Amino acid sequence: MDAPRTFHLHMISDATGETLVAIAKAVRVQYSQARAIEHIHPLVRSKRELERVLKDVEANPGMVLYTIVNQELAEHLEQTCKKLNVPCVPVLKSILQVFESYLGTPSTPTVAGQHVLDADYFRRIEALNFTMLHDDGHLPENLDDADILLIGISRTSKTPTSIYLANRGYKTANVPLIPGVPLPPKLEARTNAFVVGLVASAERISQVRQNRVLEHAASHLDAYVDREAIAAEIAETRQLCARRGWPVIDVTRRSIEETAAAILRLYHDRGAPVLE
């Protein structure tokens, strides 16, 4: 099999560069035979900073993706890339043009506008703080304050999914389901939070648990990694959720992002407001 072709990919932003990284990743995965050597250049807001970046582009020629609001800097970047004979793509330009055409009004250039310290930003910070304090069953008496509550047996991605949802602004708690351990009283009764059960295949959970056992040099946890025991735990989770009317999501073949999207679809189908 031929080795993948490598190429330099420069991502130049006047903000953090997160938008560029996400767009580049979405496109890059479509080309499995190519490997990008990434050069991320965030917070480029002056000609001096741009000149420093352009030296790197000249030293390592390759595709340039950028999000720069300052028109003078953007034009200088494009002109220099043209001289260097490298492609230069303003990744948001076509989207902004569509918005402008549809809305009948030009955009208001705002550097790092998506990171402005507004009410939405502080809501996300509050959600993240709440989620960290309510991870893995902690502070069970406050479960009513959660927007979303994830339940599931060990190794069903409850914590990373909770953190991802918190970054979207949703206060998310998670509670582990442990054989022989009763549910928190707030769950035994009825909670205001939207409860979702997470499950995965016994094979996947067993494999992940085995890796965890090896990391901690534990040799006395046979039941923890036994597939039949895990299958029984999964069945109990499904039965519990069926009795309570809680939806269940199988995360076996889902990424954290896909799991979160499925949870939010169910959450909003219930009539909850969409957070931007």
Image (spheres, grey):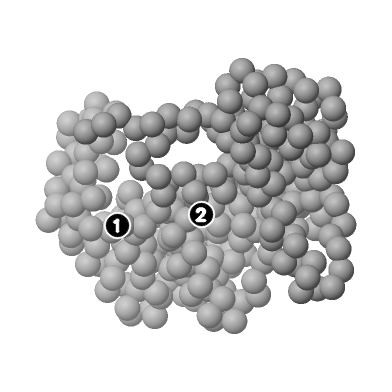
Name which residue lies at 48% across and 30% down: 7
In front of the other: 86 or 254: 86
Vertical comparison of 8 with 70: above or below: above
Residue 180 visible in the current orientation: no
> Which disc is residue 162 wearing?
2
Residue 191 lies, in percent from the top left, at 52, 72
Name which residue lies at 70% across and 29% down: 83
Label pair 1/2, CB-CB below 8 angstroms: no
Badge 1, how many Cα within 10 Å: few under 14, some, many 20+? some
Name which residue lies at 69% across and 58% down: 94
> Which disc is residue 125 wearing?
none
Badge 2, how many Cα within 10 Å: few under 14, some, many 20+? many
Res 230 → quadrant: bottom left
In front of the other: 192 or 85: 85
Name which residue lies at 54% across and 44% down: 24
Res 262 → quadrant: bottom left
Indicate the amino acid at tag 1: Thr
State left or right for residue 80 relative to residue 36.
right
Indicate the amino acid at tag 2: Ser
Residue named by callout 1? 252
Secondary element under disc 2, as helix, strand or loop, is: helix
Vertical comparison of 45 with 123: above or below: above
Secondary element under disc 1, as helix, strand or loop, is: loop
In front of the other: 198 or 74: 74
Residue 51 visible in the current orientation: yes
Residue 31 lies, in percent from the top left, at 40, 45
Nearer the observer: mark 1 or 2; the answer is 1
Quarter of the picture holding the C terminus: bottom right
